[in-house]
Amino acid sequence: MRLGIIGPIGSGKSLLSKKLAKHYGCPLLEEPVEKNEYLPYFYKDKETFAMLSQNAFYSSLFLLMWKTKDEPRVICDSTLYSNLVFTELLRLEGLMSAMEVALTYAIADEHLKRIPDLDLQIVLVRPTAQLFANVRKRGRAIEKGQEDYLNFHYAHYYDVLKRLFKNYRVPEKKVLWLELNDMEEEKEFDRIISIIEAAYAKSKE
């Protein structure tokens, strides 16, 4: 079982990934977002660091996925498709040029050829108000004062992701759109596990 977790900023990717890895007793591929040295620069100067930060994320995530490509079971708290959403959003905002976007896609396409497909792409679905509440709750200093950026991100995230799945011909049975409640509640986590396992079984049909 190789699962990838996808979702907008503040959706709970890291929390769910950790809970799933513990539940299934399998490796957790944890993208080091907060430790990425480009991220603070990106939030301060998006036009200068949009492409640089995106490719830094692709490179670090690709290496992590390459190292675990032979693992029969792994939980990924991000995927290359998840990162491509950010490229598209930055393009829509005018923060990445056509040339920069084309180069980023070329790099991502080469990455995708070299790692195995995940069994299931789990997309975390939450209302915008909850996403903002989650961002405020975790209190990352670099996310303060980013309301306009986050509003744009939330307004377009799911539509962009749907287009990416379609463009890359990801089978519908390999995508789970998962609406979340409070994951700290035992009943909610049991519900999540039940939905994931049913979707995983269907993806193998």
Image: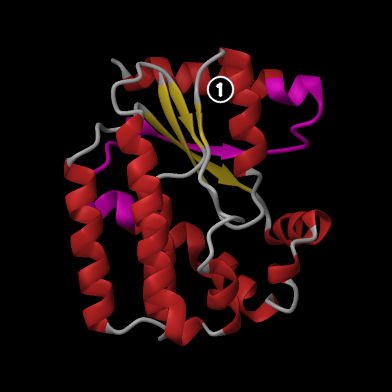
> In this rendering, is residue 63 above or below 49?
above
The answer to which image quadrant residue 99 occupies is bottom left
Viewer can see residue 160: no
In the image, 176 versus 132, the foreground residue is 132
> In this rendering, is residue 178 above or below 185?
below
Indicate the colouring scheme: secondary structure
Q: Residue at x 41, y 18 (%)?
A: 73
In the image, 189 versus 139, the foreground residue is 139
In the image, 107 versus 10, the foreground residue is 107
Q: Is residue 4 magenta?
A: no
Q: Residue at x 51, y 17 (%)?
A: 26
Q: Which residues are magenta?
A: 164-189
> In this rendering, is residue 128 above or below 72?
below
SS at circle 1? helix
Q: Tell me the kind of residue under disc 1.
A: Ile
- Tell me: 191 left or right of 154: right
Location of mark 1 (residue): 195
Q: Is residue 175 magenta?
A: yes
Looking at the rendered image, the quarter that the C terminus falls into is top left
